Amino acid sequence: MTTSTSTAGRAAKRKPLFRYSDGPLPNILAMTYSLAGYVVGLGLLLADSWLLKAGGTLLLAHAMIIGAYLMHEFAHGTIFSAPQHNARAGAVYSWMTGGCYAEFQDLRRKHMRHHVDRADVLTFDSKQFINGLPGWVRKLILALEWAYIPAVELLLHGYVILLPFLSDSEKQRARRPAVAATLVVRTAAFALLGWLSFAALVLYAVAWLVMITVLRFTDAYQHTYDAFAVLEEGDIPADKLRDRAYEQQNTFSNLVSLRWPALNLLLLNFSYHNAHHEKPVAPWYRLPALHASLYSEGYRQVVPMKELVSSFHRHRLRRVTDDDYGHFGEGPKRADNFYGAVGVSFLTAV
């Protein structure tokens, strides 16, 4: 009797796999699409038809985009009940998206600081670094950015890889074996892909760059926070009141479409950013309804992406070297002087 009662008690205390009761279906669909899309897209890169290769490149890119936003959900713990399950799943998707050179918990901690401090908290100031480079190197980076090659993100990903081998900190030195092993495995995998088809290897790189470009375009216009380069555990200056009102006033919902809200699923509803910051534990599939309940039609912080494309293009060099994010104005050209952020991706733990 005692044994059966104890067993029943443990069963009653056992948490469900998914955090929310309405979570299994949407989350299983999203995770399945991302993983299956990655595998199928990769397979299509090896097809003989260039039409299939092109379709595979787009599918692969979008599968990685959804994978990246699933990582964001795992970081907030909105999918699984147990933190360790979110961490393990986040590590899987970090391998898919190229964020695997840092531990998932480090990626999570960096992103949580963004929410807690209400600032863009960085440990590596890419703008200061780039502005301090020899002129020809800086011009090369700007030339790549002019050609829509995300040189800043490439620099940050490279920094994450090199940091354990350059740093004297005990924590970073301890990361050397894991980073080296990751490099060996990924290099071997890409070498195999290149051996099977050099075109497939090139198209994989194109798909990854498309993912990075979509993520950076979305990230660029979601905040006008202050950016601080501080040590890993350093504090930001207490130079102003960064309360919830400040957070909402400096956060923007850059929706894919107002007319067809379902299109925001292309980014796993990440563009409902004011709602996300108001309730960070709300899962991605609840954000449209939460947004509608919180904000009236015509809410100033809602900026359709079509209003931001021109600014993203015109200021693509300025945002690389200028600390100023610009400002969001009024009227039909309200985004003209909104330069945007760069190098704030949650795929890099810097």
Image (tube, grey):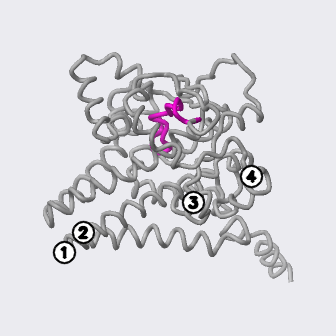
Evaluate if marks 4 and 1 touch, with contact meaning CB atoms under 8 Å apart: no
- The quadrant where residue 132 appears: top left
Mark 4 belongs to which amino acid? Glu
Estimate the spatial distance between the alpha carbons at disc 4 and disc 1, rounded to whole Å.
Answer: 46 Å
Magenta residues span: 334-350
Evaluate if marks 1 and 3 touch, with contact meaning CB atoms under 8 Å apart: no
Residue at the (51%, 29%) spot, across then down? 122
Q: What secondary structure is marked by label 4? A: loop
Closer to the camera in the image, 125 or 232: 125
Evaluate if marks 2 and 1 touch, with contact meaning CB atoms under 8 Å apart: yes
Estimate the spatial distance between the alpha carbons at disc 2 and disc 4, rounded to whole Å.
Answer: 42 Å
Query: Considering only order in the chain, which callout, 4 or 2, is on the residue closer to the N terminus?
Result: 2
Residue assigned mark 2: 53
Residue assigned mark 3: 264
- The quadrant where residue 126 appears: top left
Closer to the camera in the image, 192 or 45: 45
Q: Is residue 30 left or right of residue 97?
A: right
Image location (x, y in percent) of residue 260? 59, 64
Q: Which mark is in front, 4 or 3?
A: 4
Image location (x, y in percent) of residue 143? 26, 32
